[in-house]
Image (cartoon, rainbow, N blue to C red):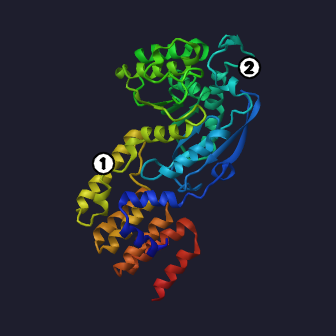
Amino acid sequence: MKKYMILIIAMLLSWAGIYQSEAQSKSKRNYLVEIGKPDKLYSKILDEKRDIWVNLPESYKADGSRKYPVVYLLDGSVQFNSLATVYNNYWGNYLPDMILVGISNQTNRTRDLTTSKVETRRGAVYNNENGGAENFTQFIEKELIPYVDSKFATTSYRTLIGHSFGGLFTINALINHPHLFVNYIAIDPSLDWDNQKLLKQAKAKLQSESFKGKSLFVSLSAEQLHMQNAEITLENVMQDTTEFTLFARSIIDFSNFIETQKQNGLSFAWKSYPNDLHGTVPLPSMRDGLLFLFDWYQLESGQMFSNPETPLAELLVLVKKREEKLTQHFGYLTPPADEELFNMGGYMYMQFGQMKKSYAFFNMAIKYYPKSANAHDSMSEYYIAQNDVENAIKELTIAYEISGRDMYKQKIDKLKSE
């Protein structure tokens, strides 16, 4: 670690601020080939090859023990850049480390994402192949998710994001396949499809079934609610009965209905965007949607960690409460913070001369990330500051055994020679 740079940063920034700053400083990706590694798999279900893009978090180590939640994004070839932009800006203090997977729907988008088959649409013959959402869901469940899980360190805490027909597909996944995902973002969903067939089905299930533990965010682009009448606004659109407003009315009807069904346990929010069109609404929707889905993740009482007057006992209570909260939401034992955050706390308190706090934070880094050579290396620096060469060598030896890096061997030899 660059110890002195970390010490300076730690003295200047708060606990939460450090983490967010690190997140932003590590953002080095620009375009699709950089933000998402291209991959593809052959689908027997679809009988075709399917392109995907995978973005791994900065902390990802192929040989590590840590596993990550996954965000699956429909229309990945178009929308992946927006998702990565939001993630890179809010990762850390607001969003957890996650694996992002973009799925291509370029081959036959309408077929993939629409939930029932129609022959006419908006009063005209509809010739596009459609109604294949169930088949595409089978591809995701039986081929794509197992493929991603086999290649990367994933958990079953999954989020699905879709726009337009993809939003329709996303709501269908929640209503009819709730075991696949925990979180859902439906961006301008096409709930008008097939005379609102899915909307009607969703209302029935939202009344009678439990969606406890699930979260849904829905968005509506409201810049142009009626293509031929600029006087139609959010305030009066539900009084309109023309085909032109059916799209918006379906989303509003769906959202208003969910808000009356508190008994089903679904965590829900929706938002209209008066300055966005259908094509521009995905970016702000992803931002607001992810922040809503993970509002519980944000670090509480960050100022208490940067305040040298906070007793160690209080800090340990806060850390434990955060671990319990994250574990409750994710559904599996979850470290309360990133390894580097513990390390930074250790160096910060060392600089303050508060060695008990320093030791506690270095020790937590080892506790939660026992296979991290860096965590043991940081603890060795604590022991060096305490003139405890014997324990410093022990920690460096563990770091060397984990990583095999010569730098740790050289540090050991130097300490032994002094």
Q: Position of residue 353 (x, y in %)?
A: 29, 75
- Residue depicted at x 43% and y 58%: 19
**Towards the viewer: 254 or 49:** 254
Q: Is residue 233 above or below residue 378?
A: above
Q: Which residue is mark 2?
A: 128
**Towards the viewer: 263 or 219:** 219
Q: Amino acid at mark 1?
A: Lys
Q: Amino acid at mark 2?
A: Asn
Q: Position of residue 239 (x, y in %)?
A: 46, 14
Q: Is residue 98 above or below residue 353?
A: above
The image quadrant that residue 354 belongs to is bottom left
Q: Is residue 333 left or right of residue 71?
A: left
Q: Is residue 362 visible?
A: no
Q: Is residue 7 above or below residue 106?
A: below
- Residue depicted at x 50% and y 19%: 249
Earlier sequence position, callout 1 versus callout 2: 2
Q: Is residue 247 visible?
A: yes
Q: Which residue is mark 1?
A: 321
Q: Residue furthest bottom?
A: 418
Distance (Cα) linking label 1 and label 2:
53 Å
